Amino acid sequence: VQRFFNRAAPLERWPYRIVFVGHTHHRFALSANGPLDIGRNLLALDPQRRYVINPGPLVNGQFAIWDRVQSVVQFRQVS
């Protein structure tokens, strides 16, 4: 994760702006500035920042929808 956010690394080496991860069983979102507030289940994405996002455990019905047009990630849960 540190190398992903390392501004000294060439952009060609890490051309991705958003990385979705799983298998931690914890819903979270990070930027280079640290953890982000996803308490309202909506994350507005800044085109100048990089993100690591975990939508949460699918076994608990948690998932995320990335809306590329609106540049937001919506966190949801099926009951």
Image (spheres, rainbow, N blue to C red):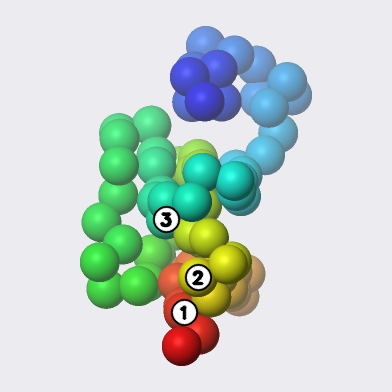
Q: In the displayed structure, does residue 44 sit left or right of residue 40?
A: right
Instruction: Check disc 1 and report the residue beneath it.
Output: 77
> Can residue 74 be seen in this snapshot?
no
Q: Nearer the viewer, residue 55 or 44?
A: 55
Q: Nearer the viewer, residue 71 or 74?
A: 74
Q: Amino acid at mark 3?
A: Arg
Which disc, if any, is residue 60?
A: 2
Q: Is residue 21 left or right of residue 51?
A: right
Instruction: Decide which of 41, 24 is in the foreground and name it.
Output: 24
Question: Label 2 is placed on what type of residue?
Answer: Asn
Q: Secondary structure at mark 3?
A: loop
Q: Depth check: 59 or 27 in front?
A: 59
- Return the residue at label 3: 27
* Mark closer to the chain start, 3 or 1: 3
What residue occupies the far front of the structure in this picture? Answer: 59
User: Up-down: is 10 above or below 47?
Assistant: above
Mark 3: give few (<14), some (14-19) or many (20+) Cα within 10 Å: some
Residue mark closest to the camera, 3 vs 2: 2
In the figure, 52 relative to 73: above or below? Answer: above
What is the spatial separation of the Cα atoms under label 3 and label 2, in whole angstroms? Answer: 11 Å
Q: Residue, x 58% and y 67% (percent of image)? A: 59
